[in-house]
Image (cartoon, grey):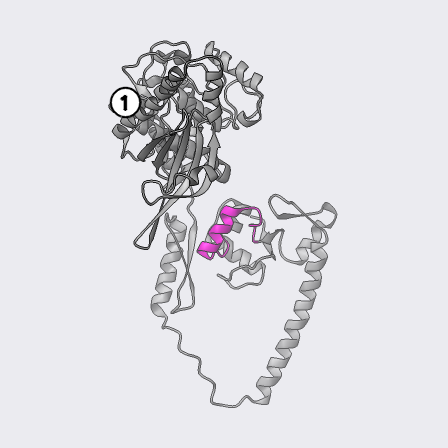
Amino acid sequence: MKDIRAFEPLWGNWFAKELIGKGSFGKVYIIEKSEYGKYYTAALKHIKVPQSYQEAEDIIAEGIDPKTVERCFEESVQKIIDEFGIMARLRGHDNIVNYESYKVIKSENSISWDIFIRMELLTSLTEYIQNNAVTQKDIIKLGIDVCKALEFCNEKGVVHKSVKPENIFVSKEGNFKIGDQGFSVDTKGRKTKYSDMDLYLAPEIFKEENYDNSSDIYSLGLVMYRFLNNNKLPFFTAGVDHSTSSEKEEAFFKRMGGQKFSAPENSDGELSEIVLKACEYSPANRFSSPTQMREELENLLHSIEARESKEDTFIKNEFNTNTGEDIFYSEIKTEETQEVTKKQSNKRARQKPLRPYEAPKRKLDLTLIACVVVALVAVFTCGFMVFGSKEKVSQQMQVNEETHIFTETQTEATTMESITEETVVIKAPLLEKDEILQEYIIQNNDNGYSICKKVYGRYNLDIWKKVMECNGMEFGQAYKEGQILYMPKL
């Protein structure tokens, strides 16, 4: 960060805190300022024109007039400054990166400029996907959010022309945003020339034909295709990050030639149709606008959420501190659980709160002591027999690492009858490799929902009562980590 320190403080009170990215465009830092005891952070992009001081000197050494060289680089600087006119028109939208300020400093001793752009601090899309388990719904939401941004760009007469993962970011609220309009132009500029191959470039732009917002739709379709296709773009045999330059070039020119490509591997029929339509070779066959594509994606998302809402919901467990009972309730109650809840409510209505413990006033007689001694001996004897039986059975079981379900061996299947009726055996909790269930257990103090769901595919109170009886446990008693539970076959 040595090169940035020479310009501090930026805008009077901003200081670089950490370098978080760099590339051919320049470097990106986290910057920070303090005002009245409060700290504020933002992102800073530092661009050098030319990229090194030596670059201009080398051109001059080839015989080019220094004034001509300076004018050429100054045009590049002016293009970046002009971009802020476009950014100002796009400022304030929830799905567009908010660029806050810029500063241009010209060197007094050489042909060079330092450009500083201050913007909101966000997470890059590539980093977000690496650190999160991304689902189809996430990719659909990405498409919806970017379509909203492109709609706004369309209203302001702007074609982005650089929709790709590197230019998509995620806010703390989970909104996807497009930024880095380094190549965007007004729609009045109908043609442009690209010297570099772009993996997400629309064919009409590459062929220097007329373009409009359907070019951005094409690029968005490719972004969604990649993350629905195991990180592979069309015609790629490996992920984008593991493909050679020649493989990328071959795939690129197949697209530019109009070759049809297959549907992404990890999407259903309707989502595949939307993505492939966005990626149609001819702009006339794509969505007519970002609005049309967004509406298609929103309808698909709503149908997915409607299907999910019909599935069984988790039954939550609440503990009543007055009665000491477990109260089961569900967000979507079946007739069976409604009846059980009604019975429990009536029972609680008849009961009085538990009184504080009072020591008995009369002395224990010898008869009572004898009964207690006999009971303890009986419990100890039964416990020893059950433990020995369970130990013998556990030696005949093999563990399935993925489901943690213990299955009986054929030769010793009859030994299960010594414990209870026909049973399967599981190790509780079933959570060592299931983080979603684990989080649910912790948050909801689950007393068996996940186990029943895992073994039987469903849950109700009668099933869990039978499991409790099978294991000699009181109804509502929570299982413990590593505990062996015997599950009746239904």
Nearer the observer, 394 or 466: 394
* Apparent side of residue 212 relative to residue 239 in the rendered image (left or right): left
Residue appearing at x 57%, y 85% in the figure: 368
Residue appearing at x 31%, y 12% in the figure: 190
Q: Secondary structure at mark 1?
A: helix
- What residue does disc 1 label? 154
Nearer the observer, 347 or 427: 427
Residue stretch in magenta: 429-449
Nearer the observer, 295 or 99: 99
Q: Position of residue 292 (x, y in %)?
A: 31, 22
Q: Amino acid at mark 1?
A: Asn
Residue appearing at x 39%, y 61% in the figure: 344
* Apparent side of residue 165 relative to residue 367 in the rendered image (left or right): left
Residue appearing at x 39%, y 42% in the figure: 31
Answer yes or no: is residue 1 visible: no
Q: Position of residue 5 (x, y in %)?
A: 43, 41
